[in-house]
Image (tube, rainbow, N blue to C red):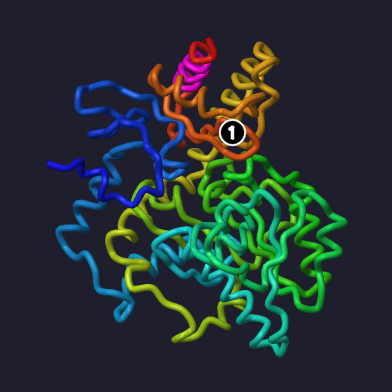
Amino acid sequence: MTDPRQHIMPTYRPPELVFERGEGMHLFTDDGAAYLDFISGIAVSSLGHSHPVLVSALKEQAEKLWHTSNMFRVPAAEKLAAKMCERSFADRVFFSNSGTEAIEAAIKAARKFHWLNGSPDRHEIITFTGAFHGRSLAAINAGGNPAYLEGFGSRLPGFIQVEWENADALDAAISERTAAILIEPVQGEGGVRALPEVQLTNLRKLCDESGILLIYDEIQCGMGRTGKLFAHEWAENSAPDIMCLAKGIGGGFPFGACLMTEAVGIAMQPGSHGSTYGGNPLAMAVGNVVWDKISDPAFLEQVYEVSQTLEQELEALAKSRPEEVKGVTGKGLLMGLKMTDGPKSLQARAREEGLLTGVAGNNVLRLAPPLIVSEDDIRNAVSILETAMG
């Protein structure tokens, strides 16, 4: 019999590990070996593995109705959208299957908004170096990473990229063709780096003055990961016009959402966008439970408190290993160790010791544990990293 792995498209290079089940903060192989999960499926498993409330919600819905498409109303989707709008800047929500699709909806909505308001030439989206907005053709052109663009034809027009945290370059890039600024309040793939809060406030002011829209990609940094429900909430007067969510929003069940104000949402009329699976009953059953858990102020306070322990422990580790670790980066429970050399060898050694981590650009070892992580889990993880460093 041939190796079944050869039939999988080789777009990933996973290790030999195969996990059979998960529970809380741990994943287990079929031989019972336990691994402390500090990447949570790239910030996806926000409530850990096999959370009983999520399992119950999914099983209950699965026994009733799986799919109808958006030809028909989905009451659970209406309920979740109402919760999101009540707790955010938004008035309208579009449910998708992924973060990439949420980004596509945001780009289309921004351009359609200006078209509807008599400025069809305003179609350019300004993004930033280090950005990651997904893997569709529009998303990779928005992100601008040459490695992700190579081999896929000419660059799509309508995307202008400027240097991260370069206010002068941003000012120079704005023109009569600018429709929106698209930015991650905390970059994930770009090196786990947070934009200073004052700059988020300044972005809102700049967009208001220039008549352009502000889009936040909170697919990785949103849903409680920084200790606030949304990362931009740390900054005053920084609410966007459009925001994209995914990853942690489903706790492991795949779905995304694009939130927008009424002024933008009114542009997206029947026929302007769609998704066969978006907002399906299974996703919405899980999504409502995840939302209720994470949006609880007490839960968010606990996330913030434990994130302080993570930052302190990582700072101490960096201080003790100055030749290997340049510093600590990130925010909340989306943190990174900026390494002197590439982080993949450390990632592999940590995995051998029972700790799962990720990597990101600029030589960063990425840590994004489930939001249920405890201080003991954090100290255990940092101890494993110390051992892995030798």
Camera-nearest residue between 228 and 35: 35
Q: Is residue 385 above or below residue 291?
A: above
Q: Which residue is mark 1?
A: 335
User: Which class describes the residues within 10 Å of circle 1: few (<14), some (14-19), or many (20+)?
Assistant: many
Residue 303 in percent (x, y) is at 52, 35
- Quarter location, residue 50: top left
* Residue 193 appears left or right of 78: right
Point 52% across, 72% down: residue: 92
Picture quadrant of residue 120: bottom right
Q: Is residue 35 magenta?
A: no
Start and end of the magenta stretch? 376-385
The answer to whether residue 161 is seen in the rendering is yes
Q: Nearer the viewer, residue 266 or 126?
A: 126
Give the left or right position of residue 50, taking residue 191 as reference: left
Residue 85 is at least partly visible in this image: no
x and y percentages locating residue 109 in the rendered image: 58, 76
- Residue type beneath disc 1: Met
Q: Position of residue 25 (x, y in %)?
A: 37, 29
Residue 333 to residue 107: above or below:
above
Chief SS of the magenta region: helix
In x, y percent, where is residue 203? 77, 59
Q: Residue at x 45, y 48 (%)?
A: 248
- Per the image, label 1 sits on a secondary structure element best described as strand
**In the depicted view, which residue is nearer to us: 243 or 188?**
188
* Residue sitting at the far bottom: 118
What residue lies at 49% left-to-right and 34% top-to-bottom? 358
